[in-house]
Image (cartoon, rainbow, N blue to C red):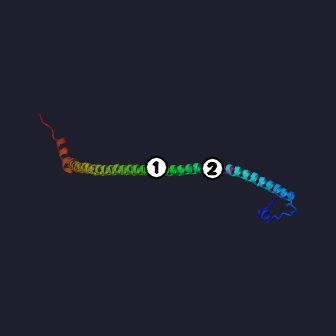
Amino acid sequence: MITAMEIRNQQFGKSIRGYDQDEVKNFLMQLAQDYENLYSENATLKETIKRLEGELGKYRKIEETMNNSLIFAQKTAEDMKSSARKESELILQDAKKRIAEVLMVYQEIIKRLSVFSTELKAQIGGQMEMLEKNQSKVDELSEFFYSRDLKDMLEKLEHINIKE
């Protein structure tokens, strides 16, 4: 391929009528051929550039779609995390509330058991006191009925006859 420098520095030989016509024709033919090749190559390169720009546009659209999808996925994930956090907080609060309620019920049961135990002790204490009083009366009566004086009196009663 001929270069621009060669075209600028091209010297044509002189003939009687001026430049050698064959040399000029050959040069022009070569120049035209090179120009045609360059023009054809330029057209091919332009088509390739258009095709590649079209493909690049497609890839950019795909990239944009993927970026939008990624952003949407990230936002969705953040929303899901936030929702899960809120739900877990609500579950935790509900669990704490239920635990507090159960503890309050147990405290109430313990209070009632304590009151019941106190009342039962008082009743048992009263019953024990009555048993002790009854036992002391039984002891007194036993002492009386098993005493020597009563035996003597019974013996005397046996000896007494009623006379008609």
Closer to us: 30 or 127: 30
Q: How far apart are marks 1 and 2 (CA)?
A: 38 Å
Mark 2 surroundings within 10 Å by alpha-carbon count, few (fewer than 14), some (14 through 19), many (20 or more): few
Q: Which mark is residue 57?
A: 2
Q: Residue placed farthest to the front in the image?
A: 17
Mark 2, secondary structure of its residue: helix
Report the magenta stretch's main SS.
helix
* Among numbered discs 1 and 2, the one appearing first in the sequence: 2
Q: Residue placed farthest to the top in the image?
A: 164
Instruction: Examine the structure image and report whether residue 81 is included in the region drawn in magenta.
Output: no
Picture quarter with the N terminus: bottom right
Mark 1, secondary structure of its residue: helix
Picture quarter with the C terminus: top left
Closer to us: 107 or 123: 107
Residue 77 shown left or right of residue 60 in the figure: left
Residue found at x 88% / y 62%: 16
Closer to us: 124 or 65: 65
Residue found at x 36% / y 51%: 100
Question: Three-letter amino acid code at disc 1?
Answer: Ser
Q: Dot 1 corresponds to which residue?
A: 83
Residue found at x 73% / y 53%: 42
Residue found at x 70% / y 51%: 46
Question: Three-letter amino acid code at disc 2?
Answer: Gly
**First to last magenta residue range:** 51-56
Q: Position of residue 103 (x, y in %)?
A: 36, 51
Q: Position of residue 15 (x, y in %)?
A: 87, 62
Q: Position of residue 109 (x, y in %)?
A: 33, 49
